[in-house]
């Protein structure tokens, strides 16, 4: 592909792949642990980062390289690193900038797995997570001190289906020269581009909409083209600006490459190694090709189902960003392409815990699954599954009532899905 700026759907299909002599249309799966050097000098140059190239697949792999270039192009980033899961991508994004004694600011409405990572696992590493409310960010700035290394939030949150005021969060991050990190998993780069709004780092679980068919676990970190500038000479990120003794005295800030992801690769993938396999990378590439078509269908189906639920006499409340009474309506218009809001819909029935479970049991087309972003429609009752360990007070705080049901709307025919829900709600 030439360097012309192409539109997302074109990038999702063609960016990052230069055909080799075999001219395969499908990106080859380079199933190799290691790579041969032409001579000892080249080997030395690669280890010294004087020449960029493959050494060992824990660090780089040609199939992963195509996926990385494609994701960076789609998000408008400088570079990308793919990892073996979304969770490891998020861990690396934080571990790349924070150490014991530091703190990070995290949004209150985020994925449960990320909450666990921040509030429990990172705590044991000496990194403190301070929670701010994305619906009222007036308290955010007061949480910042000299040890604050990141502000983390989700563009469209799973499972709360809340939209973050991206521009306002970014303005505070920029004012204090702190790296902002946005999890763009549910929105996908087709519907929302956080880097365009000034976000520094985007993370993804590729296991959801991007791969799209519920067949793989994978993650990615994308850094913004302006991030080197933010890190250089910034006292918050001293380890990027002083010699790294584990890399023969390399000063990352002096390197003319996207240094955030360079360090994710040369320090964290090197030492911890949650590397994506070439085969899984290839599966994600297959999904990426149809991402736009799917995310449009997911969004349109979800919108139709949300409207149907709004008019249903047995439904107490519906949560979907583009519906009339959603508190996120204006944010959806501002940040989401064509006002499409992805496939998550949640609703409360006029009934109790048992009746909500009964609705889940009565559907035919919705599978009871704790996942999102599959082409197949999924349904879950949070109070008896994902959130069953929470106390009554914690459930209230998390806005999870006993009659709440969450859907990940698939791309089956919307009429069939609505008929299925009609029967289940009888
Ligand atoms: C699933 C998910 C993750 C974790 O990703 P895995 O690929 O399952 O490790 C992180 N963030 C969000 C928003 C998710 O939905």
Image (cartoon, rainbow, N blue to C red):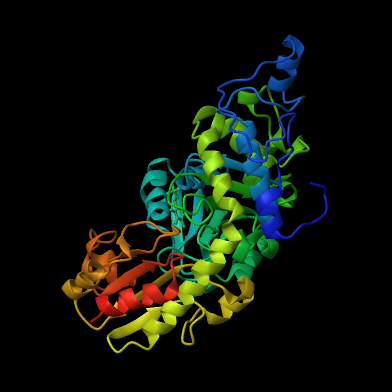
**Location of residue 256 in the rendering, given as x and y in whole percent from the top left corner:** 78, 38
Residue located farthest toward the top when viewing the structure as drawn: 40
**Location of residue 88 in the rendering, given as x and y in whole percent from the top left corner:** 47, 42
131 vs 150: above or below? below
Residue located farthest toward the left when viewing the structure as drawn: 354
- Left or right position of 5 against 85: right
**Location of residue 124 in the rendering, given as x and y in whole percent from the top left corner:** 38, 42
> Residue 81 sits in which quadrant?
top right
Q: Is residue 98 visible from the viewing direction of this image? A: no
Residue found at x 71% / y 41%: 17
> Residue 375 sits in which quadrant?
bottom left
258 vs 107: above or below? above
- Left or right position of 92 against 386: right
Q: Of 348 and 105, which appears nearest the observer?
A: 348
Q: Is residue 120 visible from the viewing direction of this image? A: yes
Q: Quadrant of the image for the C terminus?
A: bottom left
Q: Of 392 and 70, which appears nearest the observer?
A: 70
Residue found at x 70% / y 51%: 73
Residue found at x 35% / y 83%: 317
Badge count: 0
**Location of residue 355 in the rendering, given as x and y in whole percent from the top left corner:** 19, 75
423 vs 241: above or below? below
């Amino acid at each position: 592909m030439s360097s012309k700026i192409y539109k997302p759907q074109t990038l999702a299909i063609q960016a990052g792949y230069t055909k080799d002599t075999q001219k395969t249309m499908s990106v080859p799966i380079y199933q190799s642990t290691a790579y041969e050097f032409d001579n000892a000098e080249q080997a030395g140059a690669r280890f010294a980062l004087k020449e960029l190239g493959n050494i060992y697949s824990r660090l780089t792999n040609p199939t992963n390289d195509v996926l990385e270039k494609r994701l960076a192009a789609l998000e408008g980033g400088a570079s990308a690193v793919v990892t073996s899961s979304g969770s490891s991508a998020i861990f690396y994004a934080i571990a790349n900038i924070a150490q014991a004694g530091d703190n990070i600011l995290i949004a209150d409405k985020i994925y449960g797995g990320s909450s666990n990572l921040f509030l429990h696992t990172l705590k044991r590493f000496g990194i403190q997570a301070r929670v701010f409310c994305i619906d009222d960010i007036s308290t955010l700035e007061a949480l910042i001190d000299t040890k604050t290394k990141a502000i983390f939030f989700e563009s469209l949150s799973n499972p709360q289906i809340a939209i973050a005021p991206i521009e306002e969060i970014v303005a505070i991050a920029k004012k204090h020269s702190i790296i902002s990190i946005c999890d763009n998993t549910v929105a996908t780069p087709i519907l929302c581009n956080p880097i365009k709004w000034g976000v520094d780092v985007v993370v993804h679980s590729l296991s959801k909409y991007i791969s799209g068919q519920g067949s793989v676990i994978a993650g990615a970190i994308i850094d913004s083209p302006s991030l080197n500038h933010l890190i250089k000479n910034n006292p918050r990120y001293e380890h990027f600006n002083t010699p790294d003794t584990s890399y023969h005295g390399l000063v990352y800030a002096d390197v003319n490459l996207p240094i955030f992801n360079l360090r994710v690769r040369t320090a964290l993938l090197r030492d911890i190694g949650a590397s994506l396999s070439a085969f899984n990378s290839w599966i994600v590439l297959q999904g990426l090709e149809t991402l736009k078509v799917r995310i449009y269908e997911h969004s349109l189906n979800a919108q139709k189902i949300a409207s149907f639920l709004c008019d249903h006499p047995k439904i107490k409340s519906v949560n979907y960003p583009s519906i009339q009474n959603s508190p996120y309506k204006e944010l959806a218009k501002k940040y989401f392409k064509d006002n499409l809001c992805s496939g998550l819909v949640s609703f409360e029935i006029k009934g109790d815990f048992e009746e909500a479970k009964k609705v889940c049991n009565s559907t035919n087309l919705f599978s009871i699954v704790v996942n999102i972003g599959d082409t197949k429609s999924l349904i879950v009752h949070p109070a008896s599954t994902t959130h069953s360990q929470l106390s009554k007070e914690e459930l209230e705080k998390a806005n999870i009532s006993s009659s709440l049901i969450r859907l990940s709307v698939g791309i089956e025919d919307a009429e069939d899905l609505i008929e299925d829900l009609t029967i289940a709600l009888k």
